[in-house]
Amino acid sequence: MTMTKLTDYYAVVLTNKWFYFSILATVLSYLALRESFIGFVHDYLQYGPTIASIHDPLLRFFFLTFRYSIVLTEMGILCWEWYAPVEPIDITEPETIAIEVVEPVAVAIPEKPPAIEVIAEPETINFDPLGFDLETGVISFRGKSCEIPFKTKQYALCKKLFECPGSRVTEYDILMLIDRALAVDPARARRIVRDAVYAVNAKAKTDLGIDELFIWSKLTVWINEAYAPDFLGG
């Protein structure tokens, strides 16, 4: 049931018989509470609190009935209306739906040409090995290329590593190729080599699809054997 206004709630409660039963229960519980309280006072004054305590359960019951019967009944009525089961739809008498029948119109359908079987040529797979061109500064791998700028630390790094395939090159040897003055500052040297390795790896991942082309660890750098087994003699 849809309830959008405050009057909708009262309409449901006021038209339910249990609401009036709760009013009757409230009135009766008030009268019973009154009599029980009078009996409690009488026994308390005559016999003391021990004898009068036999009235406690009745006093609590009649008080709770008097106080909450109407409120709980209203809540029960509203909850039942909200969650009342949906009445089944009577399908014994289905509605009659008028459907206009249109006569089919003959349409000339052109003949379908015979299907031509297309044989797909096998895709060419490029197995070009990993390589570095010193003249162009381009790293090539399986038909893809990645350009490294000339006269940069990245170019010097690639030149040194591809000159010694399969071997691990120290940071000192790389710095001697870049700038001899940098080799005397170990902290700066490590940062320069590390930045160059990270920059080349980022370009190789974007252009060649290679993840971690160069590996840098323990002051040495080498080419990842996973991408160049033939090139490295593996």
Image (cartoon, rainbow, N blue to C red):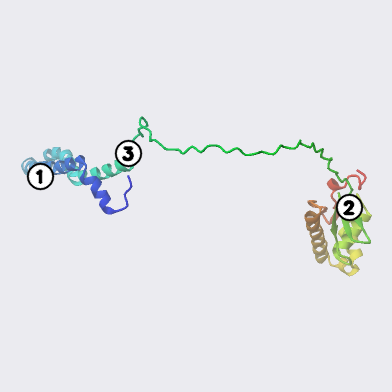
Give me the C-alpha separation between circle 1 and circle 2. 101 Å
Q: Position of residue 131 (x, y in %)?
A: 90, 53
Query: Which residue bears the numbered disc 1?
Result: 34
Q: Nearer the viewer, residue 198 or 79?
A: 79
In this rendering, would 185 be left or right of 9?
Answer: right
Asked which secondary structure carries label 3, the reply is: loop
Residue flagged by tag 1: what amino acid is it? Arg
Q: Position of residue 73 (x, y in %)?
A: 23, 43
Instruction: Using the image, determine if residue 75 lies above or below residue 137.
Output: above
In this rendering, would 228 be left or right of 211?
Answer: right
Quarter holding the C terminus?
Answer: top right
In this rendering, would 217 be left or right of 132?
Answer: left
Query: Which residue bears the numbered disc 3?
Result: 84
Give me the C-alpha separation between circle 2 and circle 3. 79 Å
Are the residues at dot 2 and dot 3 in contact (C-beta closer than 8 Å)?
A: no
Instruction: Using the image, determine if residue 13 lies above or below residue 89.
Output: below
Residue flagged by tag 2: what amino acid is it? Arg
Query: Which residue bears the numbered disc 2?
Result: 168
Callout 3 crowding tier (Cα within 10 Å): few <14, some 14–19, many ≥20? few
